[in-house]
Each structure stands twice: as structure tokens, then as C-alpha cells.
Image (spheres, rainbow, N blue to C red):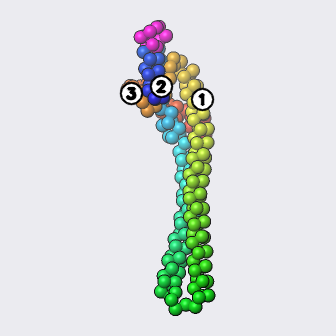
């Protein structure tokens, strides 16, 4: 619903500005389109941020694999103990059987705790990675928007539209200033 409203608003604004309802734009008006997502992702800072996040993701995955391996080892121990109790249970003395059953119960509790801890680690890892990524990309986005404003003022553009999914359906390549935005941003961030 929100996308439809935005889309209708964009179409209405464009129709109004381009001659459908007023004289806001003359024949010599300058219009441009920028793909902010591409500008953020293809800037040096965006590429570096993705690399940092990729390394962090790999580190977190390594920790999770280590934890899973420990849980799998515990599962193997539990199965072996269960098998031993099944096979030798009838010939064991009652106190030995009780001791083995108590050990089995303890290992099952330990397994449950470790499994819960793994789930918590996965959730926290995803959340932390997402927050960190949003924070890093958010800073870059703010700086990219400043560059777009600068290009707009220096290039005397009347309107710069963000190319978003569902927004701009067609444009000439000449009005796409995304490459120019990336280039200027990278120069400023040297």
C-alpha cells in the first residue's frame, strides 16, 4: 500500500512538474536520476564496508561451527551411553545403572543448554551483523546524499530523483548521474 502511494505521488509530481499542471519546469530544465543503492554499494567505502562485514560474518560462522561441532560430539556421547545402558543395563549392578542413567540425564541437560546457547548465538550474530551493517552503510548513505546535493547545486539541476524499485521505470542513460556521484564521493573520501 505504501509503495503504491509513493509511486502514485511520484507519477503525480512528475506529471505536474513536467507540464501536466503548471509551469514549474521549462524546456531547459535539468533533470537527473541517481541509483543511491548502487552508489553506496559501489563506492570505495561501500566496498570496504562489505569486505569488513564479510570478514566479521566469516568469524561469527567459525564460532558457530565450533559450537555445532561440540554439540555433535555431545550427541555422539549421549548415543553411545544410551546404547551401553540398553545393552549392559540388565547385567549392571543397580548403583552402576543409576550412575550411568544420572550421567545420561546430565549429558541430555547439557545438550539442551548448549543447543539453546547455539540458537541464542545465531540470533545475536545475525542481529549484531545487521546492526553493524546498517550503521556502516547508513553513514555512507548520508555522505552520498550530501554529494548528490552538491552535484545538484553545482550542476544547476532542477530535480534529482532517486532510482528506486518501483520508482523510475524508464530513463535515458544521460540523466543517470550515479557514476558521477560515486566518482565525486570517492575523491572526497581519499
* Apparent side of residue 76 relative to residue 188 in the rendered image (left or right): left
Q: Residue at x 59, y 38 (%)?
A: 138
Q: How far is disc 1 from disc 2 in space, using C-alphas?
A: 23 Å
- Image spot of residue 104 (x, y percent): 57, 77
Q: Please name the residue shown 60% across and 45% down the image.
A: 131
Element type where label 2 sits in the image:
helix
* Residue at 53% over, 78% down: 77
What distance separates the C-alpha of mark 1 from that of mark 3?
Answer: 25 Å
**Where is mark 1, residue-wise?**
146
At mark 3, the secondary structure is loop
Measured Cα–Cα span from mark 2 to mark 3: 14 Å
- In this rendering, is residue 6 above or below 49? above
Q: Quadrant of residue 150?
A: top right
Q: If you read the primary sequence from the N terminus, does the residue marked by circle 1 or circle 2 appear first? A: 2
- Residue 17 magenta: yes
- From which residue to which does the magenta span run? 16-27
Residue 59 makes an appearance in the image = no
> On the image, numbered disc 3 is attached to which residue?
169
Q: Residues within 10 Å of mark 1 (few under 14, many from 20)?
A: some
Tag 1's secondary structure? helix
Q: Residue 107: x, y in percent? A: 58, 74
Amino acid at each position: 500500500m505504501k509503495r503504491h502511494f509513493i509511486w502514485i505521488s511520484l507519477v503525480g509530481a512528475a506529471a505536474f512538474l513536467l507540464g501536466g499542471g503548471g509551469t514549474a519546469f521549462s524546456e531547459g530544465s535539468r533533470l537527473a536520476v541517481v541509483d543511491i543503492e548502487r552508489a553506496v554499494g559501489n563506492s570505495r567505502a561501500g566496498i570496504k564496508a562489505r569486505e569488513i562485514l564479510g570478514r566479521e560474518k566469516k568469524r561469527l560462522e567459525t564460532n558457530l561451527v565450533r559450537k555445532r561441532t561440540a554439540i555433535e560430539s555431545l550427541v555422539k556421547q549421549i548415543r553411545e551411553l544410551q546404547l551401553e545402558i540398553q545393552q549392559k543395563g540388565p547385567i549392571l549392578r543397580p548403583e552402576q545403572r543409576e550412575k550411568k542413567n544420572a550421567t545420561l540425564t546430565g549429558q541430555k541437560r547439557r545438550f539442551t543448554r548448549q543447543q539453546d546457547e547455539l540458537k541464542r548465538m545465531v540470533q545475536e550474530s545475525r542481529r549484531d551483523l545487521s546492526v553493524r551493517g546498517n550503521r556502516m552503510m547508513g553513514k555512507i548513505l548520508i555522505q552520498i546524499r550530501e554529494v548528490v546535493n552538491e552535484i545538484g547545486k553545482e550542476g544547476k539541476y532542477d530535480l534529482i530523483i532517486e532510482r528506486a524499485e518501483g520508482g523510475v521505470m524508464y530513463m535515458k542513460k544521460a540523466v543517470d548521474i550515479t557514476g558521477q556521484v560515486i566518482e565525486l564521493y570517492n575523491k572526497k573520501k581519499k
